[in-house]
Image (cartoon, grey):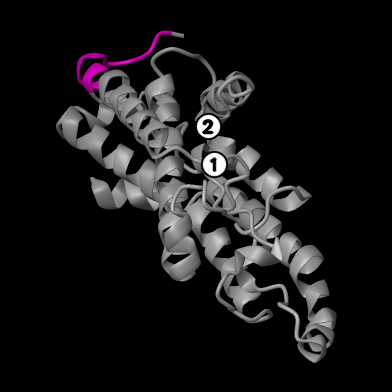
Amino acid sequence: MIRMEMKRAFHNRNFYIALIIGCGIAIGQYIQNVLPMIKYLPMDVEKGVYPHSVFNKWIGGEYHTLWPMLFYFILPVLAALPHGDSYYQDIQSGYFKNICTRTKKSSYLKAKAWAAFSSAFAVITIPLFLNLLLASMTLPALPPEVSTGFFYVMDKNMGAELFLEHPWIYILLYILLDGIFAAFYAGIALAGTCFVSGRFVVTILPFTIHMILYVLAMGISSIAPVSFLSPSQPVPANAMIIAAEGIAASAAVFIFYYKKGRTDEYLEE
């Protein structure tokens, strides 16, 4: 069951569309914001000044330019696109009822969730790793120096000490965090099948929640995923808030997707 759902998730048009969009943004950021820095490296070395490095110019090292803002704003859509609407499609087409005559509902639901989570994780982390690889092949990986003013991560930011001492570990952990939240967004799309009608509505439900939190963040800035999912942390992230939102998303998926899915045979039109 898992193998079949994984194949459906990773070998469909929407997965490739999401991956192409994500990688397109990653490459666009590299071309516009990283490559131009090459011409300044000889001058910086000659003058003995700290040059721009991979840690402040890759897509996760900056924020207030087009490409990183675009990536983190549409992250929920990219995450839900590959397999987030598949539960709704299966119910509407009758596939859900058919497959459940041959296997346990719980097995189907677990397999679908795993496939949705995995495909969402992939379409978000692959572009980030691609951009990081390109940037690291172009710019030096000098230890971050706060006094230069090149870096968004300061003492007040979550994980600042780790970033300054072990920037590669900080980046890898942050990419992992982004992938996990992408999985949460895909799970929200699955859970939303119980409440909304239409593939498009199911797919954009995570983005809608994403934007609601962004609007609410006008008062409490640290609750917006669009801010704390960027490794640059344009607004200092709060680990407790991140954990609380992750727990809330997990609970919603478990209750409205898994538990409800085990009792409901179909969604009414």
Label 2 to label 1: alpha-carbon separation: 7 Å
Q: Is residue 186 left or right of residue 260?
A: right
Q: Is residue 228 above or below residue 248?
A: below
Q: In percent of the image, x 58 and y 29: which residue is there?
A: 221
Q: Is residue 115 left or right of residue 236?
A: left
Residue 135 on image: x %, y %: 65, 73
Camera-nearest residue between 15 and 209? 209
**Amino acid type indicated by mark 2:** Ser
Write down the quadrant of residue 257 in the picture.
top left
Q: Which residue is mark 1?
A: 236
According to the picture, the residue beneath numbered tag 2 turns out to be 222
- Disc 2 packing (10 Å; few <14; some 14–19; many ≥20): many
Where residue 209 sits in the image (x, y, percent)?
Answer: 53, 23
Q: Residues within 10 Å of mark 1 (few under 14, many from 20)?
A: many
Residue at the location (53% across, 49% down)?
Answer: 15
Is the residue 257 above or below the residue 170 in the image?
above
**Residues at circles 2 and 1 in contact by the CB criterion of under 8 Å:** yes
From which residue to which does the magenta span run?
Answer: 259-268
Q: Amino acid at mark 1?
A: Pro
Q: Residue 187 in the image: state x and y as whole percent.
A: 38, 33
Front-most of residues 35 and 263: 35
Instruction: Tell me the residue at 48%/62% (across/down).
Output: 163
* Secondary structure state at the residue bearing disc 2: helix
On screen, 114 above or below 49?
above
Query: Horizontal and vertical percent for residue 260?
Result: 26, 16
Q: Residue furthest front?
A: 147
